[in-house]
């Protein structure tokens, strides 16, 4: 399953971005670069995510379906708030919006997609 790596391009406290704020996620993509929803529903395992913040903290999570869209949620904690995740096309150079439950938005730029 491909691994997508994204770096913060813009956020409320980082208008110029921060390469130390990154998200890596495992996700199947269609030929058009969109999340493969059929593969998501067929996979018995969660699609893992990992966010590393500038202070070095690492948060493990998973990609989920929420309110007809996509979201990130911390692993093993269905009570934690979800962070709506809005990918259009997932290719290097494209941008993805992540909306923290506290408000605002974080814009991440996709910098790589590796087959691991």
Image (cartoon, helix red, strand yellow):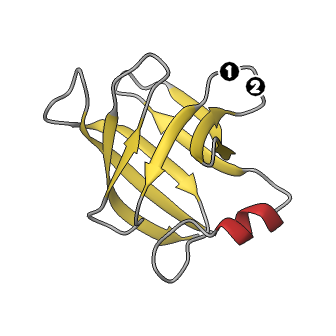
Image location of residue 71, percent across then percent down:
58, 41
Rate crowding at label 1 as few (under 14), some (14 to 19) or many (20 or more) other CA atoms within 10 Å. Answer: few
Residue found at x 66% / y 48%: 48
The image shows residue 52, relative to residue 70, as above or below, that is above
CB contact under 8 Å: marks 1 and 2: yes
Residue furthest out toward the bottom: 31
Image location of residue 58, percent across then percent down:
53, 30
Residue found at x 32% / y 46%: 108
User: Looking at the image, which is closer to me, 51 or 66?
Assistant: 66
The image shows residue 24, relative to residue 38, as above or below, that is above
Residue found at x 40% / y 66%: 89
Q: Is residue 62 left or right of residue 45?
A: left
Image location of residue 115, percent across then percent down:
54, 73
* Label of residue 77 in the image: 2
Q: Is residue 50 left or right of residue 74?
A: left
Q: Quarter holding the C terminus?
A: bottom right
Q: Secondary structure at mark 1?
A: loop
Residue that badge 1 annotates? 80
* Label of residue 37 in the image: none
Distance Cα–Cα, label 1 vs label 2: 6 Å
Q: Secondary structure at mark 2?
A: loop
């Amino acid at each position: 399953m491909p691994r997508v790596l994204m770096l913060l391009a813009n956020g409320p406290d980082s208008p110029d971005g921060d390469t130390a704020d990154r998200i890596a996620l495992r996700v199947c993509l269609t030929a058009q670069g969109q999340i493969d929803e059929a593969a998501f529903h067929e996979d018995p395992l969660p699609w893992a995510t990992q966010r590393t913040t500038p202070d070095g903290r690492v948060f493990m999570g998973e990609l989920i379906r929420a309110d007809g869209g996509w979201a990130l949620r911390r692993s093993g904690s269905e009570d934690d708030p979800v962070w709506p995740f809005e990918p259009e096309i997932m290719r290097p150079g494209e941008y993805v919006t992540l909306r923290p439950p506290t408000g605002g938005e974080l814009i991440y730029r996709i910098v790589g997609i590796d087959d691991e």
